[in-house]
Image (spheres, coloured by chain):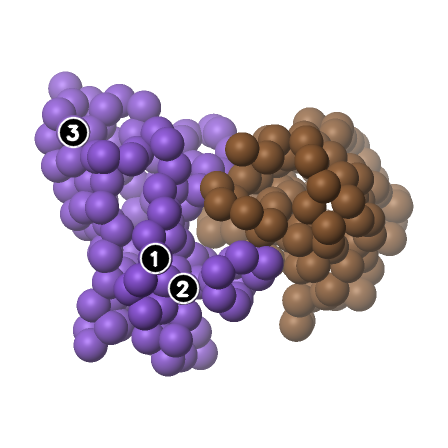
Chain colours: A purple, B brown
């Protein structure tokens, strides 16, 4: 059974940092592109970042470029999101999601349960 | 970025009703269009991919159609578990943009 379990969320002050983790199981993690998607309270889904299976490609939404860094450890079956210079508008539930294929053209076929990040003083 | 616009933003319907939600892309995305369902406090769940392909395990009352810029999701006979928010998403290009969501409520 495919499982994605996020952790690392919490309350952080503006300007602070947080690292999210997404532990994957039930599939060959190293073969799949992975994404982060966020959802502010009461709002819609917003794509944040993606990381290719082989580590050659990373992409970011303009709103987080230069502040967030996506990475992965295929030996640990874990995806990460390092979030620096956090702002109030980064407050959201952060989901990791598996890409159903590679590059473009495929849906997010599995999602984690999400981890809440709250940026507030 | 490709803008995805859903309509309506919300709707009220009864169990057994036929419901259709539309999604329009700001440029052609071929059939790289996916639909997700989300219940409050839960993660989104994939329903339809490539505009019209039903994800494994999804009931056949869900169907999708369209290509280019105009797409639709239809629920042929609304069931109690279908009351949720539905999102379309393009997988044509990065950034992978979503529609704003359509909340399906009980009438």
- Assign the C terminus of chain A to one quadrant of the image: top left
Q: Residue at x 35, y 42 (%)?
A: A60
Residue sitting nearer the eye, A66 or A83: A66
In the picture shown, does residue A88 fall above or below B53? Answer: above
Q: Of the residues tagged 3 and 1, which is closer to the observer?
A: 1
Q: Are marks 2 and 1 in contact (CB under 8 Å)?
A: yes
Residue sitting nearer the eye, B46 or A55: A55
The residue singled out by tag 2 in the image is A33
Callout 3: chain: A
Secondary structure under badge 3?
A: loop
**Figure quadrant of residue A9:** top left
Residue sitting nearer the eye, A6 or B23: B23
The residue singled out by tag 1 in the image is A57
In the picture shown, does residue A30 fall above or below A36? Answer: below
- Residue A91 seen in render: no
**Figure quadrant of residue B62:** bottom right
| A76 lies left or right of B2 | left
| A75 lies left or right of A99 | left
Q: Of the residues tagged 2 and 1, which is closer to the observer?
A: 1
Q: CA distance from mark 3 to mark 2?
A: 26 Å
In the picture shown, does residue B22 fall above or below B8? Answer: below
Callout 2: chain: A
The residue singled out by tag 3 in the image is A85
Q: Residue at x 57, y 39 (%)?
A: B98
Secondary structure under badge 1?
A: loop
**Nearer the N terminus, badge 2 or badge 1?**
2
- Same chain, marks 3 and 2? yes
Secondary structure under badge 2?
A: loop
């Amino acid at each position: 059974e495919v499982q994605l379990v996020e952790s690392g969320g919490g309350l952080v002050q503006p300007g602070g940092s947080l690292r999210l983790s997404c532990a994957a199981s039930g599939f060959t993690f190293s073969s799949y592109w992975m994404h982060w998607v966020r959802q502010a309270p009461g709002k819609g889904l917003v794509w944040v970042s993606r990381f290719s299976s082989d580590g050659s490609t990373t992409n970011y939404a303009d709103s987080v470029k230069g502040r967030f860094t996506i990475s992965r450890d295929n030996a640990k079956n874990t995806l990460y999101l390092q979030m620096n210079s956090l702002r109030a508008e980064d407050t959201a539930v952060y989901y990791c999601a598996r890409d159903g294929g590679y590059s473009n053209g495929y849906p997010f076929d599995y999602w984690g349960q999400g981890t809440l990040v709250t940026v507030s003083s | 970025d490709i803008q995805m616009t859903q309509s309506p933003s919300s709707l009220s319907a009864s169990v057994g009703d036929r419901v259709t939600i539309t999604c329009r892309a700001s440029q052609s995305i071929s059939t790289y269009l996916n639909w997700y369902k989300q219940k409050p406090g839960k993660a989104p769940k994939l329903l339809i991919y490539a505009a019209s392909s039903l994800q494994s395990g999804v009931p056949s009352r869900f169907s999708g159609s369209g290509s280019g810029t105009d797409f639709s999701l239809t629920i042929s006979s609304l069931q109690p578990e279908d009351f949720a928010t539905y999102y379309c998403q393009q997988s044509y290009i990065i950034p992978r943009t979503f529609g704003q969501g359509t909340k399906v409520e009980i009438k």
